[in-house]
Amino acid sequence: MFRKILIANRGEIAVRIARACRELGISPVAVYSEADRAAMHVRVADEAFLLGPAPSGESYLRGERVIEAALKSGAEAIHPGYGFLSESASFARSVREAGLTLIGPSPEAMELMGSKTAARRTVRDAGAPVVPGTVEPISDPAEARRVAAEIGYPVMLKASAGGGGKGMRLVTSPGDLEPALERAGSEAASAFGDSSVYLEKAIVKPRHIEIQLLADRHGNCVYLGERECSLQRRHQKVVEECPAPFDDAGLRKRMGEAAVTIAKAANYEGAGTIEFLVDADRNFYFLEMNTRLQVEHPVTELVTGRDLVHAQIRVAAGEPLGFSQDDVQLRGHAIEVRVYAEDPESQFTPSPGRITRLREPSGPGVRVDSGVYEGWEVAIHYDPLLAKLAVWAETRDIAIGRLQRALGEYAVGGIRSTLPLFKALCVDSAFRSGDIDTQYLDRWIEERSATGFGKEPAEELVRDLAVVTAAFDAHDRAPRTAEASARSTSNWKRAGRYGGVRN
């Protein structure tokens, strides 16, 4: 087992990994930008190394500086978390060449599954279902028109090298195809440095279901249930659940076995996720593979009782998984919401600034993975994710009730957050029934644009009314004179007894 691990990330995921390291007796090492000198992930680490200025291109994306910090600290391994360098095959190769261990898959597996077109070829050759379309990048408008006519409209253009909605265009008619192809390629080049795109059949109102995998270097590979990720805003996940609301054991088994087949075809090692689109008839199609830890991993941990970060670290150290598919059991239901520093009332514009007040929920079945604290300055340079609120309960209905309770306890002052969005969503009938698809949230937000979500109270009104009331009550009850004080003292106290115990 490693003695020291450098965490090449920031925010809540860096804090999450640091805690896992401590639980395994490993010393966590942080890296930070100039904007993150006082960040929570720096505070929870044993050591911290400056990477550079605030922009991620000059700090967290500088792989050579990350490796230099790891070597200087004496760390044997680097955990990239998600985002930044987590799916960079070139970084993974550089880590290996430096004599360090990357807690993740091999660079070869990253390259194979990181390219959407190469991944589609691998999946097709493995016999798993793929959405009809091209398995090679396409740039010729005439060829794009031919393929689109063959598979039928609507079709989707997607960036070969990326995700998150970048370089993605839905095309519903032949006349829109050529300009969409040009725009998708331009956006892909800007976002990923690669203008190549591919074309596939658009599945109407699909569900986005993903399978969590764990694989070791000894040939063991298991799936840990599915996650429902259909609630997305502009192709970005917002709410995740485990298991999916339809809770179909047969479909789960088929998708899980297909995911394991794909992972083995890629010689995959570590934690990874196979994402599928599921149509109204419960047919599923490979979408992509994420060769890293997912943002939404807490819901799987809550339902399976398996710590995915522990497993990542152990597998990277050469240990076997230590359990089989038959040992994986799903218990209860978990839901996660991503709390962003964004204003839902202003088209989700970022809301940087100082957090002047923070009250996070707690209690049975509540988990908060947070990377911020009261007084922290939310920077404009990075993803606006503040925290992830996850809840677990015996059933989905109880989990929704628990989520509502936790959201009622959650308060963020000084900036705007997406908390009002989730409070409104919890009482939505379609969400509560699980009748959703990947476009549902965008439609729901559009419908609510006129009425809004309900603004969070201004900071001066966010105070706990119960505390204020209690203070006034205590003031009213306070004795006014010594005589009144004597009268208010109980006979037990005058007798020197406290709770039945004599002094």
Image (cartoon, rainbow, N blue to C red):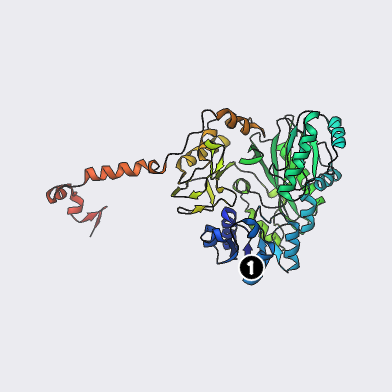
Q: Is residue 179 left or right of residue 463?
A: right
Q: Amino acid at mark 1?
A: Ala
Res. 358 in view: yes
Measured as percent of width and height from the top left, residue 501 is found at 26, 56
Measured as percent of width and height from the top left, residue 440 is found at 64, 31
**Which residue appears at 64% of the width and 59% of the height?**
58
Measured as percent of width and height from the top left, residue 51 is found at 61, 64
**Which residue appears at 76% of the width and 29% of the height?**
172
Measured as percent of width and height from the top left, residue 279 is found at 73, 32
Please tell me which residue lies in front, 391 or 177. 177
Q: Is residue 396 left or right of residue 135?
A: left
**Which residue appears at 66% of the width and 64% of the height?**
66
Q: Secondary structure at mark 1?
A: helix
Q: Is residue 17 left or right of residue 189?
A: left
Q: Is residue 91 left or right of residue 385?
A: right
The image quarter in which residue 160 lies: top right
Q: Residues within 10 Å of mark 1 (few under 14, many from 20)?
A: many
Res. 257 in view: no
Residue designated by label 1 = 69
**Which residue appears at 73% of the width and 36% of the height?**
169
Please tell me which residue lies in front, 205 or 148. 148
| Image quarter hosting the C terminus | bottom left
